[in-house]
Image: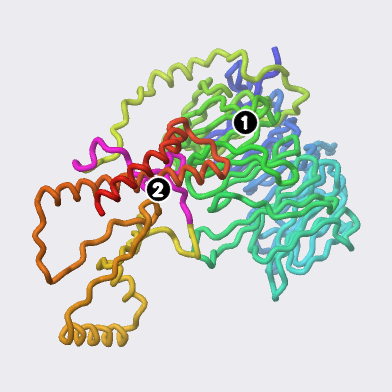
Amino acid sequence: MASPLQFAYRTQKAIGVFDAAPVYEDLPGFDKPGGNLRCCVYSPCGRYFAYASDEGVSIVDASVGHVLTSLPIPTVYDLSFSPRGSYLSTWERSAMDENGDATKNLLIWRVIEHVEEGAEKQPIGKFVQKSMTNWNLQYTADEQFCARLVTNQVQFYQGDDLTTVWNKLRAEGVTDFAIAPGMNQNVAVFVPERKGQLAGVKVFNMPQFATPISQKTFSRGDKVQLKWNALGTNLIVLAQIEVDKSNKSYYGETNMYLLSVNGSFDARVILDKEGPIHDVAWSPNSKEFAVTYGFTPAKTTLFNHRAVVTHSFSLAPRNTLIFSPTGQFVLVAGFGNLAGQIDVYDLEKDHRKVTTIESGNPSVCTWSPDSRYILTATTSPRLRVDNGVKLWHVTGGIMYNQEMVELYNVMWRPAPLESLPSGDALHPVPAPHASALAYLDTVKTPSKPAGVYRPPGARGTVTPLHFKREDEGGAAYIVGNGTLSVGPSGFGRLRRRILGAEGAAMEEDEGLSKTALKNKKKRNKKAKKGAAPPRAPVTRIAPDSPVFVTPIALVSPVVQVVDPATAANQSANAKKIRGLQKKMRAIKDLEMRYASGEKLEDTQVKKIKTKVDVMKELDVLAKQSA
């Protein structure tokens, strides 16, 4: 039997290591520690597991659960391993010594080294690191070099000698950097906009720091996310601006750029839907990446390494995307304030949707190393109820469920792909654990949804397009000229302005000062006394125009006698005209979406084909009303 998958978790009272499929049991050789447990982590290679408690830091053999070594530091708040698991970094809260100087709270230790009996293990490097944000050293993939950010420079050290600075990359104002994975020893640095200079990202090859091998400047950027592909050949720069000057978004503005390390390509990634960028991720094959973006319902699109669109998924309320470790699947999910639905797509079979998982309200979602399972967990302090872990098969069935009290963290044990069983991840579907069957018995069968409330006059009618989301056939959410498409109260779309209506006069008065309004009222009062009100001009608008409105009856001093039968006929025709005009607007909206490349439903295509009949019926009714 292949070695089981494994995950670790940390709760309020214990840290556990659990062997998942196919055995579903606690790791036999691991003794669960208790007390004040602050953090735990696996090494990227999967060989070691470390946790911190009031007694110190313990390093465990992840295969059998035995403690290999302990570090005598009882106040550690975070841990991190180097890529190959040779070194362990520990971070403690910053403090002052007797002389008023900051203590060295960032320590680097060798994981495995010979220590004489009776002697204590000593760190190989010590640094002052006050902030917990980006506190750890960054290593190259072979651990030959590591680096840390200081004021106006990035300092590089040899992996086995942290007492002497090996080299320096000087960049005035640098606020972030990222070392590329893979065997390409490249580093990217970000300098925000300052003193009239544009913000920019530069890529250097170590140790030639005099001239960048690739760079990209952009006008606006307060902070960035630097995302390398797995080979370290391409870099995505996600630039974020804290304040959106156009007032389009409360959360600021995001732009995305793509660079190649050889300098042959750099460009801004153009997105065809307005709104923020929710998530971006590289595929493990390093040849494509995916972006979830736009106002809800968001759009998820696949790009190749030259930022050319290769596929777009259907619109849905989603904000998270994660590629499976093998690159065969991608999950697109909606977490946080969304419903917790997870869509799984098979990228090797024409991007076919495999399943949709109703995961509830998880705060953690990760793939298993073999791409066959998805782990979801609800953790504290985001939610202090319904904490626990669930395992789902890639086909959508739940395999395991465990409820916990105040679960703080959960993570898979990393494993190299070559050590995992190969074969079809979709078949065969394994048998679920007994806990999954018990969980399914407690889940209530969803009853028929009651739907939204409708007033009596609207019951039995079709929902108007302007009340529907974009993925339900409604119009796209559009922001233009820096003005949100909402009404004066902050809700709904702006009403159409109709000539002669009271609302139009009120809108004209909004931009006038108090004195101007007072003078306007005096002029209107004199005009009313001096002459009779003139007849309002009639504006002729084509019936098939999207802004066509039924003319308003004009006020006339002459009383006209109208036949009741004729008036009823005109009222019925006007009602039909309004209905047909509404249908024409919906057809034109569908035509624009079809022209932009969006795939429409069969019912929507049939609706477009009725355009000629609707126009003919409009012409007939217009002649009858003339």
**Could you tell me the amino acid type at mark 2?**
Arg
Q: Quadrant of residue 221?
A: bottom right
Give the quarter of the figure containing the N terminus.
top right
Residue where numbered disc 2 is placed:
585
Q: Measuring 8% from the left and 60% from the top, which residue is drawn there?
A: 561
Overall secondary structure of the magenta stretch? loop
Numbered label attached to residue 447: none
Picture layout, residue 431 above or below residue 330 = above
Give the quarter of the figure containing the C terminus.
bottom left
Q: Is residue 453 left or right of residue 377?
A: left
- As for residue 341 lying within the magenta part, the answer is no
Q: Are marks 2 and 1 in contact (CB under 8 Å)?
A: no
Q: Is residue 364 left or right of residue 264?
A: left
**Could you tell me the amino acid type at mark 1?**
Trp
Q: Residues within 10 Å of mark 1 (few under 14, many from 20)?
A: many
Q: Regarding mark 1 in the picture, which secondary structure is present there?
A: strand
Q: Position of residue 424 (x, y in %)?
A: 67, 17
Residue where numbered disc 1 is placed:
367
Q: Foreground: 201 or 126?
A: 201
Q: Measuring 25% from the left and 68% from the top, which residue is drawn there?
A: 502
Q: Position of residue 236 (x, y in %)?
A: 71, 50
Q: Regarding mark 2 in the picture, which secondary structure is present there?
A: helix
Q: Foreground: 249 or 57?
A: 249
Q: Is residue 122 left or right of residue 90?
A: right
Q: Earlier in the sequence, mark 2 or mark 1?
A: 1
Q: Position of residue 57 (x, y in %)?
A: 68, 41
Magenta-tinted stretch:
456-478
Q: Position of residue 452 (x, y in %)?
A: 29, 39
Q: Foreground: 169 or 223?
A: 223
